Amino acid sequence: MSGTFGAMSQHPTVHAAERPDHAALVMGSTGETTTYRDLEDASNRVAQLLRRRGLRRGDHVAILLRNRREWFEVVWGALRTGMYVTPVNWHLTAGEAGYIVSDCGARALVADADLADTVAAMGTHLDGVDLRLVVGGDLAGFEPYEETVRGQPPERVADESEGGWMLYSSGTTGKPKGIRPPLRDIALGEPTPFAALLSGLYGFTADTVYLSPAPLHHAGPAGWTTMTQRFGGTAVVMEHFDPEELLALVERHRVTHVQLVPTHMVRLLKLPEEVRAGADLSSLQLVVHAAAPCPPDVKRAMLDWLGPIVHEFYSGSEGAGFCAIGPEEWLAHPGSVGRSLRGAIHIVGEDGRELPAGEDGAVWFEGATPFEYHGDPAKTAAAWDERGWSTLGDIGHVDEDGYLYLTDRVGSTIISGGVNIYPREVEDVLIAHPAVLDVAVVGRPDDDMGERVVAFVQPIEDPADADALAAELVSWCRDRLTHFKCPREVRFVRELPRLPTGKLLKRNLPD
């Protein structure tokens, strides 16, 4: 496969040739800057190392790194040699992270020295890993990244080809699933449908300054930062999310685009009014949110603050469906995640028949990108039906205008007294209470009703009288919802087990 580029090519190599001193990456807290020349040099050296150690097109490279410069060097080195890249969530236990390294069949692992204890405890999960590199320190059995990569030539490998991502689901209800799309048989840097979406729908160009506040191991930050670099823009990456620091970075770097999750939005809105009002956010052209359900009151507050630049999309790493909604559309259809831009939406009942507008059922999409769950044909089969439709496992409905409203996940539904209760509806009510910082609603076994509704609440501050606040929250719900949907029990916790992407690990809530 050729490594030549056409006029429409989108790849850091093109920008390294055309404007080598332009910033490809800026690290948020340190200001460390990587130019396109730097990125080209480092990623070529990584590619040369992978080839010299025997890795070929279709092999897998796992990355267990915090948000740091080397993450991008490794990603671009692997992607330009036709390999699958699997970022591993560094919040996971050694067993969970090791499972992903082993399950994806990684032949190379690049790990952070700060995560030495996690890596050391992976044990036999590392048996298939031939090339082991450590960044930022020492780790038994691992070669030093800087020294090893620096010893490679900076020229492009002769057999460059486009690689791809093999991402793992968050594992919110069970073991993570590896999502394996087929490798694209295209020339290096050839534009993709995702590139057309970001440029056409969200205005990404070579002048874009994109701020990523989330861990790079997640699909959104990984895809959007690297796509910014395909366009020739600048990715500003926060090492850790801090709401006040985010505002400072927007002002300092004249950020044009930022992607948030609802948890980020709640934290930003909880800042003192004088802090929010004092930030110069005039450079912002687009704020986009996704990855988790957004309570309507939070969305309205963001629009009131920032104006009509807040957009939303709904999709999944699997590539099944893509819905989007702009600010004006959302005000006309509050609570919706938009209309499909890729294949028709079908709402299907338990009997497999399609439901009319307004009725809740499983959400299925036509025209999904082909994918499989790695090593799990049963889960792959469950994601598709005989009509070629695919599902992400969500419940929702469409209105008469074709706008999709998500109710909850299939696996999150509480069945109490034979009635389906969707936790998201209750969570959206509770998060609006002024004493609540975060909330999760789940079902717990109940001898009488089968399941009872339990709310886990993270209060803004420790309540002086927990019983009184619990009773107040139940009353708050009963004023706004049918009584059978309201919590029968409220438990206060210091923090909910959320991933930095905003997704809640309900399986990690206390019994």
Image (cartoon, grey):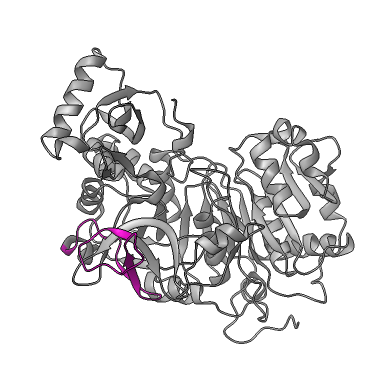
Q: Is residue 289 visible?
A: no
Look at the image and give the residue range highlighted in magenta: 332-361
Q: Where's residue 175, x and y in %?
A: 58, 44
Say if the magenta span includes residue 333.
yes
Relative vertical location of residue 500 with respect to residue 435 in this rendering, above or below: below
**Position of residue 187 in the picture relative to residue 417 (left or right):** right
Q: Quadrant of residue 283?
A: bottom left
The residue lying at 47 percent from left, 75 percent from top is 388
Q: Where's residue 507, x and y in %?
A: 48, 36
The residue lying at 25 percent from left, 60 percent from top is 336
Q: Quadrant of residue 445?
A: top left
Q: Quadrant of residue 163?
A: bottom right
**Position of residue 426 in the picture relative to residue 220 (left or right):** left
**Which corner quadrant holds the N terminus?**
bottom right
**Position of residue 282 in the picture relative to residue 105 (left or right):** left
Q: Residue furthest top?
A: 464
The residue lying at 44 percent from left, 48 percent from top is 249
Relative vertical location of residue 346 with respect to residue 276 in this rendering, above or below: below
Return the residue nearer the eye: 445 or 470: 445
The residue lying at 52 percent from left, 65 percent from top is 228
Return the residue nearer the eye: 65 or 92: 92
Q: Where's residue 496, x and y in %?
A: 41, 31
Q: Where's residue 47, x and y in %?
A: 78, 64
Say if the magenta span includes residue 364.
no
**Position of residue 447 in the picture relative to residue 477 (left or right):** right
Return the residue nearer the eye: 111 or 178: 178
